[in-house]
Each structure stands twice: as C-alpha cells, then as structure tokens.
C-alpha cells in the first residue's frame, strides 16, 4: 500500500519532497533485519518488501530469488528478504529488465565473495611484498 498526500497536506508535511509517512515507513522497513533462522510466507515477504505476491512469484520463476517450497506454498528466509529488497532497488534503476537484474545480482554476489576472500587472506598475514 502506497501512501499519498492529499491536497490538504501542506509543505511542512514534506521533507525533501517526500511525504513524512513514507519516509518513516521506509526507515522502519530498512531498520528491520530478519533473523537468519526466521522463515516467512509469501504474504509476509510481500508485506516486508512492500511488493505484490504476484511479483515475488515472477521473481521466483525467473530465478532471481529461490524460496523454500512445499505443498503449502513458498517460504523465504532472511537472505531471501534481503535479495527481494535488492531486486526492488534495482528495479527502480533498471526497470523491468529481469535478465539485467539477474546479472547484476550475480555480479554483486561475486564481489561479496571476492571481498570476503581478500579479507580472509589479508587477515592470515599473507601480505604480498613487491621488490627486493
């Protein structure tokens, strides 16, 4: 559900062009970090990410997010919620180019993996010395 300001709302109810209600709501969603062991139904995931269930089902069909599934439906863990949020953020830039979004997600995961590898290597004292 999107918040809209009515004509009666004044400029004092806006902060940098956005309605106060949507700012506080988006901050509340950003502050919520799903516990790693929590599992959410597609309805709860749709509510947390603020997207229709149907759109989440499309993301699943395109392989953008992989839910756990059983005879009762789709279920999403905390990592899937974060992925859905990332997809929605990318949609604001890429539009409905799901193939492009899938490629960007793969690249983002690869960058995370490589960063982790660099940090683990630098933490082990494996410094590269150039010269001599």
Image (tube, grey):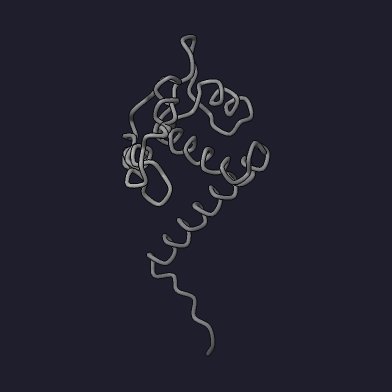
Residue at the front extreme of this rendering:
8
Residue at horizontal 44 percent and vertical 21 percent from the top: 75
46 vs 4, nearest the viewer: 4
Q: Can the viewer see residue 22?
A: yes
| Apparent side of residue 37 relative to residue 75 in the rendered image (left or right) | left
Residue at horizontal 53 percent and vertical 47 percent from the top: 109
| Apparent side of residue 25 relative to residue 70 in the rendered image (left or right) | left
Q: How many labels does the image show?
A: 0
Residue at horizontal 43 percent and vertical 48 percent from the top: 17
Residue at the bottom extreme of this rendering:
132
120 vs 54, nearest the viewer: 54
Residue 3: image location, x then y, percent: 41, 31
Relative height, residue 96 to residue 58 (above, below)? below
Residue at horizontal 49 percent and vertical 80 percent from the top: 129
Relative height, residue 100 to residue 129 (above, below)? above
**Quadrant position of residue 10:** top left
Q: Can the viewer see residue 30?
A: no
């Amino acid at each position: 559900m999107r918040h809209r300001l009515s004509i009666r709302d004044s400029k004092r109810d806006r902060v940098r062009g956005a309605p106060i209600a949507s700012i506080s709501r988006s901050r509340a969603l950003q502050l919520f970090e799903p516990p790693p062991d929590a599992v959410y139904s597609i309805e709860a995931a749709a509510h947390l990410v603020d997207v229709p269930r149907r759109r989440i089902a499309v993301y699943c069909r395109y392989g953008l997010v992989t839910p756990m599934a059983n005879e009762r439906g789709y279920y999403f863990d905390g990592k899937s919620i974060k992925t859905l949020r990332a997809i929605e953020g990318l949609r604001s830039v890429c539009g409905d180019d799901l193939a492009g979004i899938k490629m960007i997600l793969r690249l983002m995961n690869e960058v995370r993996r490589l960063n982790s590898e660099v940090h683990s290597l630098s933490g082990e004292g494996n410094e590269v010395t150039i010269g001599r």
